[in-house]
Image (cartoon, rainbow, N blue to C red):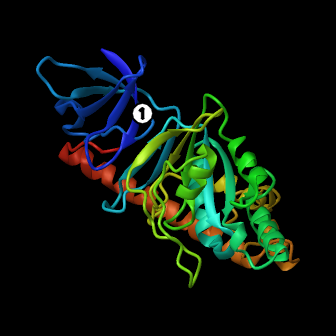
Amino acid sequence: MLEGQVVKLDRGYPLVRTEAGDELRCKHATALVKGEKVRAVIGDRVLLDIPEAHDKAIIAEILPRKTEFVRKDPTERALPQVLAANFDTVLIAQPIADVNLRRLERELVLAHETGADVAVILTKADLAESDEDIERIARKVGDLVGARDRVLVVSAEEPESIDAVRDLVAPGTTTVLIGKSGVGKSSLVNLLVGCEVQETAEVREVDGKGRHTTVSREMIDVPGGGCVVDMPGVRGLGLWDAESGIEAAFSDIEELAASCKFRDCRHEAEPGCAVRRAVEKGELSQSRLDSYHALRSETNEIRERREEASRIRSRTGHPRRRG
C-alpha cells in the first residue's frame, strides 16, 4: 500500500498526495465507511490501494490522528464531526472592526480542545477608524485570550504584520485558519503566500465586509514556511467533549476556582466562592462568567446526550460515527 496525506477536499473526491509527491483522486473503501461511516478529512494520513483498471485510488485505512478539530455535527443530535486533522497550530481570524467576543470565546474553546498552539489574528486593520480603536480592541481581545495565546493585528498595508503571522506557519508544520465567512481568511492566505491562490470577493463599501468564497479545504504551501488550511466559514460551532478546551480558554476562572471553599463549587450562590468574590470586586466581568456557565452547560448537555445515544446504540447494535 501507498501512504499519503489528504491535501484537498472539495465537492469531488479527496485529493491525496503520496510520499513520492504524486497527487491522486481517491474514494473510500466500502469496508471503511460501512457501519461507522468514517471519512478522511483534510490533513489525514491514509493508506491507499491502487487497483488495476480503476480510475481512482482507494483509501483503505485512515492512520491515527495526532490532532483533530471537532465540533458537534449540526445535522445530528449527539455525534461529533471532524473538520481537520494532524495540524500544529490553529489561527482564529476575526475582523478588528467587527470582533464578536462571544463567538471568539467559543472558537478559543474548540481550538484549545485540539491540543494545538492557538493564536488570534485580528484582520482588516486598514479598515479601522483609528489607531486608538485598534489598540483598544486588541487590548480587549488580549484580556479575553489571556497570556497563553498570541494576538496579532494584520493590515494588508503593513508587510511586517503579515511577516509576524508567517512566522507562526513554521517549516514542516500545518496551520488551520478558522473564522466565519467574510473575515478575510482567503485574503490573509494570499498575503502569506505572496500571490492570489485563494479567490476573494469584493468588499462591500457599505460595511467593509466581503462575501465568503472558499468552498474547499486545501493545504496550501507558504513559501519558506509550512502549510496553511483555509477552512470554509463554519457557522455552527457546537461544542463536543470540550472540558479541556474550556479550562484553557477560561484559565483565569479555573485558577480562581481552585480557591473556592468547596471543590464542587458551581460559582453561583455557594459560600466561600472565589469566583463570585472576583466578580464582586470587579476583577472578573459578570458577562465572562455568564459565558463560562453557558459553555459548561452546553458541554454537560452534549455529554448527557452522548451517554444516552451510547446506551441506545448498545441496545440496538448500531456503531457510532466520527469523522
| Count of labels in the image | 1
- Residue 277 appears in the picture as rendered: yes
Residue 103 vs residue 127: left or right? left
Q: Quadrant of residue 72?
A: bottom left
| In the rendered image, the vertical position of residue 233 relative to residue 31, given as above or below | below
Return the residue at label 1. 44
Residue 41 vs residue 255: left or right? left
Residue drawn at 71 percent across, 69 percent down: 126
Foreground of the two, 144 or 308? 144
- Residue 272 appears in the picture as rendered: no
Foreground of the two, 71 or 222? 222
Residue, far left? 53
Residue 50 vs residue 158: left or right? left
Q: What is the three-letter code of the residue carrying label 1?
A: Asp
Residue drawn at 19 percent across, 37 percent down: 34
Residue, far right? 281
Q: Residues within 10 Å of mark 1 (few under 14, many from 20)?
A: many
Residue drawn at 59 percent across, 77 percent down: 208
Q: Position of residue 150 (x, y in %)?
A: 76, 52
| In the rendered image, the vertical position of residue 241 relative to residue 264, given as above or below | above
Q: Position of residue 89 (x, y in %)?
A: 62, 42
Q: Position of residue 129 (x, y in %)?
A: 75, 79
Foreground of the two, 293 or 161? 161
Q: Quadrant of residue 213?
A: bottom left
